[in-house]
Image: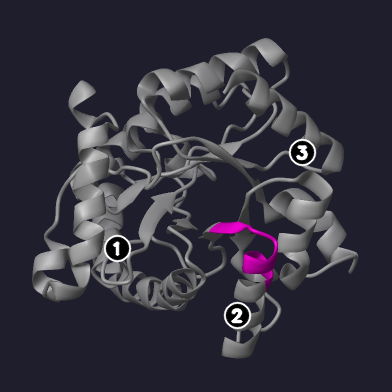
Amino acid sequence: MNEYRINRRNFLQKTAILGATSMLTPGFISGLKANPTPRMVTNDISIAQWSLVDEIRKGKWKTLDFPKIAREDFDINGIEFVNTLFEVPTLHYLKTLKQNAKDYGISMVLIMVDDEGETCTPSKEERKQTVINHQKWIDIANYLGCHAIRTNCRGPENAPKDEALKWATETYNMMLEYAVPANVSILIENHGRLSNDADWMEALMKQVNHLYFGSYPDWREPGPEFDNVNFLRKMLPYAGGNSYRNQPTEELTAQMIKMCKDAGYRGWYGIESSGREAIHQGKALLKKYL
């Protein structure tokens, strides 16, 4: 497992490649293979937009207000978007959002992409269309300065795991051909079915084995069908971010943060616990244990 761990050497390799991508041919870029690494050597805290989705749905504020909310209400340095909450992502809209983030000293971390097709499906045509659907969000992430987009990889119910591994591998290899020249990583969050299976996800990470491909562990509360501690442990070597959630006890929260530190993870902890009180609590816990 150590050979897949995040380390400084991998980070420096990636940094060097980032500066050179504009000079590489698409064929060469698509062949780059290495361990996924975050583009940071320190830790920081961000807010996932989904944690405040109820306020947005009630019309209290819009995505353009997100940088102001993050800075003035929480004094947090980063924000993570949800694509379905962008009102009208025209160029003028994106320019305004970019300026708002600059005005408040906010880093735009990533875009969580939903409702753009299944990445793990037996249909070759559907896989191609899913890749096409994600390309606009890769472009938007590039324009805003986000380091990644977050995808879903659920697969059909009761899908044969070996076949599903082939479907997902093909999809993500196609997606990476577009994402790498845009300097945007592709991450997968555990959102049910195959993406909740740590062993299958680990197999997918090893199969694709690409510098710009990784996991985005969702720290959901433990349950009878999901061991979040074991899942995090297996996904940390590939983590390009963490979807942080407050755990049932402070001790468990501290344990999971320590796991990240011990694994060598350095990067954003995006608080996705629901509501303002939970966000403030999460920030306090992260500051205490980081």
Q: Secondary structure at mark 3?
A: helix
Task: Work out how far the residue at label 2 is from the one at label 1, CA to CA, in angstroms.
Answer: 28 Å
* Residue 219 image offset from top left, x and y in percent: 58, 32
Q: What residue is shown at x 37% (from left), y 57% (from top)?
A: 186
Quadrant assignment for the C terminus: top right
Of tags 2 and 1, which is closer to the observer?
2
Compared to residue 198, the image places residue 102 above or below, namely below
**Sooner in the amino-acid sequence: mark 2 or mark 1:** 2
Q: In percent of the image, x 73 and y 19: which residue is there?
A: 248
138 displayed left or right of 8: right
Write the residue at 23% across / 31% down.
4
Q: How many marks?
A: 3
User: Which residue matches tag 1?
Assistant: 171
Q: For numbered disc 1, what is the local secondary structure?
A: helix
Q: Which residues are magenta?
A: 100-108
Q: Earlier in the sequence, mark 3 or mark 1?
A: 1
Q: Amino acid at mark 1?
A: Thr
For discs 3 and 1, the disc positioned in front in the rendered view: 3
Q: Quadrant of residue 251?
A: top right
Question: Do labels 2 and 1 touch, CB within 8 Å?
Answer: no
The quarter of the picture where residue 86 lies is bottom right
Measured from the top left, where is residue 205 in percent x and y? 28, 42
- Find disc 2 in the rendering and name its residue: 94
The quadrant in which residue 106 appears is bottom right
Q: What is the C-alpha distance between the residues marked 3 and 1?
A: 34 Å
Residue 76 position, x and y percent, is: 69, 46
Q: Give amino acid for label 3.
A: Ile
The residue pinned by badge 3 equals 279
User: Which residue type carries mark 2?
Assistant: Leu
